[in-house]
């Protein structure tokens, strides 16, 4: 799990203000939940950090800033066979690739 903030440099709508306007978290599967800090508070869920930026970035007026570093993933198990080990290794690489893309 990883926390983020939305930093708004210009408020085109005049509703959310400037500065840190929202706080959020990205879960290990990439899903994000975000809470607006304005007078009109609401909470929303997004498929990814990319979706948050696409929807709320307003062409660079707002940016997603990570509060936490990319978490370290450690997978420990005793594979029953080589095929099981290779499948688990592939899943681990996919998770690392997805987290790196959400930097």
Image (cartoon, rainbow, N blue to C red):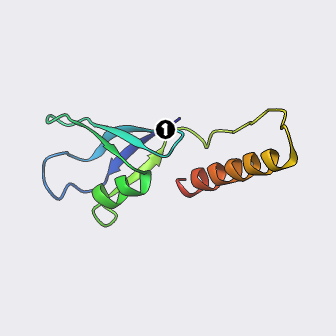
Please give left or right for residue 79 compared with residue 21 in the image: right
- The quadrant holding residue 72 is top right
Rendered residue at 74%/36% (across/down) = 74
**Residue behind mark 1:** 27
Query: 47 or 39: which is nearer to us?
Result: 47
Rendered residue at 27%/62% (across/down) = 58
Please give left or right for residue 39 compared with residue 59 in the image: left
Q: Is residue 35 above or below residue 15?
A: above
Circle 1: is it few (<14), some (14-19), or many (20+) Cα within 10 Å?
Answer: few
Residue 102 coordinates in the image, percent (x, y): 52, 53
Rendered residue at 72%/53% (across/down) = 90
Residue 98 coordinates in the image, percent (x, y): 58, 54
State how many labels appear.
1
- The quadrant holding residue 73 is top right
Residue 22 coordinates in the image, percent (x, y): 31, 40
Q: Is residue 50 above or below residue 78?
A: below
Rendered residue at 75%/36% (across/down) = 75
Query: 28 or 60: which is nearer to us?
Result: 28
Please give left or right for residue 87 compared with residue 94 in the image: right
Query: 46 or 64: which is nearer to us?
Result: 46
Q: Is residue 42 above or below residue 50?
A: above
Residue 69 coordinates in the image, percent (x, y): 60, 41
Mark 1 lies on a secondary structure that is loop
């Amino acid at each position: 799990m990883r926390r983020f903030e939305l930093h708004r440099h210009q408020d085109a709508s005049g509703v959310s203000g400037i500065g840190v306007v929202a706080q959020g978290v990205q879960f290990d599967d990439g899903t994000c939940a975000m809470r607006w800090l304005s007078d009109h508070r609401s909470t929303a869920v997004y498929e990814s950090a990319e979706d948050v930026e696409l929807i709320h970035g307003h062409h660079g007026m707002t940016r997603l800033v990570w509060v936490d570093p990319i978490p370290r993933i450690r997978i420990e198990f005793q594979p029953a066979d080589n095929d099981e080990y290779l499948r688990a290794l592939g899943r681990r690489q996919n998770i690392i690739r997805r987290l790196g893309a959400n930097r």
